[in-house]
Amino acid sequence: MEEGRSKRKSLRVPVNLDVRFDLADGSTLKAKIINLGTEGIFVKSDEPLRPGESVSLEFLIPGTLNSIQLTGEVMYSRTDEDEHDAEYHVAGIKFSDLAEPYHGMVRDYTLKMLDNEELLRDGGILLVLDDLRNLPPEDRLKGYHILIKKGSGPVL
């Protein structure tokens, strides 16, 4: 099981969204969000982010016209290689100030993603259920109802 997953208080779903970071030194970094939740994001970029670094970030939730602008802290960062030995960087960002209405937009988007067959197949239903167990009761119930309506079988 993914390290730290049981501590999460939100559902994380795989996505492919553009994000722009404004760094403390005045530079800008563009990256891809590869998973998203109300507590934070996991990103892939060409340039590294430093653990402990405070960042301002902006991204769009699909199906909306509003950009989400907030701050976060880089919790961890590492360098990986793809199948062609090309180097890239990944980082986990914890949101510092995801307030309404942005919190509701991200929460609703992640819950909506439970209706995505690919998420359940690739992300694994057990990992999704593990995330759901940590949600506040009203969000947990919404998530379970979405899965039950899909005919995913019994949800415990």
Image: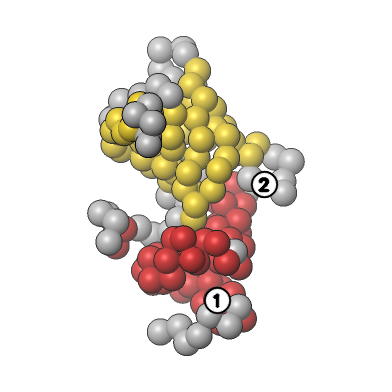
Q: Residue furthest bottom?
A: 154
Pointer 2 local density, CA inside 10 Å: few below 14, some 14–19, many at least 20: few
Q: Secondary structure at mark 1?
A: helix
Residue 138 place in picture, x, y as percent: 52, 73
Pointer 2 residue: 62
Q: Is residue 110 left or right of residue 89?
A: right
Say if 108 sits above or below 47 in the image: below
Q: CA distance from mark 2 to mark 1?
A: 21 Å
Say if 143 sits above or below 111 in the image: below
Residue 105 place in picture, x, y as percent: 62, 52
Label annotation for residue 156: none
Q: Secondary structure at mark 2?
A: loop
> In which quarter of the view is residue 49 placed?
top left
What kind of residue is marked 2?
Answer: Pro
Pointer 1 residue: 147
> In which quarter of the view is residue 60 placed?
top right
Q: Is residue 127 left or right of residue 38?
A: left
Front one among 110 and 127: 127
